[in-house]
Image (tube, grey):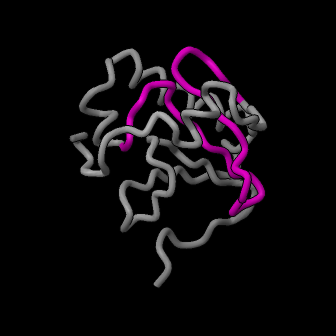
């Protein structure tokens, strides 16, 4: 059982299939540790997903099982994507949902990068 309690990693989840090239994506960035692409249902003018290339279901799983190089490489990729998208000057939000109560839809750890407009409060009242 993974650290997250989400169940075992499903190698046929949509992000795993994108990583294998079975499903196309609008790629923004790729290196040995991460792939970033535009969300198919954007919630802001800029909405990009950054996923690690390893099979991790959640942040808990990733932080417990990924190598130091994978962790550093992934978070450097998140920063590189935000800079490449020109989000540094106006600001942006990072979001990582973990588990059903948070709204995680794909059981592959990922970070959302939102920007391009004022984003308001972090949580709805």
Q: How many marks?
A: 0
Measured from the top left, where is residue 88 in percent x and y?
66, 42
Q: Is residue 19 left or right of residue 66?
A: right
Measured from the top left, where is residue 109 in percent x and y?
44, 41
Q: Is residue 38 magenta?
A: yes
Residue at 47% across, 73% down: 123
Q: Is residue 123 left or right of residue 68?
A: right
Considering depth in this image, is 48 or 123 the residue closer to the camera?
A: 48
Residue at 37% across, 38% down: 9
Q: Where, by quadrant of the figure, is residue 100 drawn? A: bottom left
Q: Where, by quadrant of the figure, is residue 31 drawn? A: top right
Q: Is residue 26 left or right of residue 78?
A: right
Q: Is residue 123 above or below residue 80?
A: below
Residue at 72% across, 58% down: 42
Measured from the top left, where is residue 41 in percent x and y?
72, 59
> Going by the picture, which residue comes out furthest to the bottom?
125
Q: Is residue 8 left or right of residue 47?
A: left
> The magenta stretch spans which residues?
29-58
Considering depth in this image, is 121 or 5 the residue closer to the camera?
A: 5
Q: Is residue 59 above or below residue 83?
A: below
Measured from the top left, where is residue 124 in percent x and y?
50, 79
Q: Is residue 2 magenta?
A: no
> Going by the picture, which residue comes out furthest to the front?
12
Q: Which quadrant, please, contains the N terminus? A: top left
Considering depth in this image, is 116 or 24 the residue closer to the camera?
A: 24
């Amino acid at each position: 059982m993974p650290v997250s309690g989400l169940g075992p990693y499903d190698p046929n989840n949509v992000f795993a299939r994108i990583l294998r090239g079975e499903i196309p994506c609008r790629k923004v960035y790729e290196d040995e540790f991460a792939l970033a692409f535009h969300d198919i249902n954007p919630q802001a003018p800029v909405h990009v997903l950054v996923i690690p290339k390893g099979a991790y279901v959640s942040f808990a799983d990733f932080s417990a099982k990924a190598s130091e190089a994978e962790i550093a490489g992934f978070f450097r990729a998140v920063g590189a994507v935000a800079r490449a998208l020109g989000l540094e000057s106006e600001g942006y939000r990072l979001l990582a949902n973990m588990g059903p109560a948070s709204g995680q839809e794909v059981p592959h750890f990922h970070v959302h990068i939102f920007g391009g407009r004022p984003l308001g409060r972090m949580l709805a009242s």
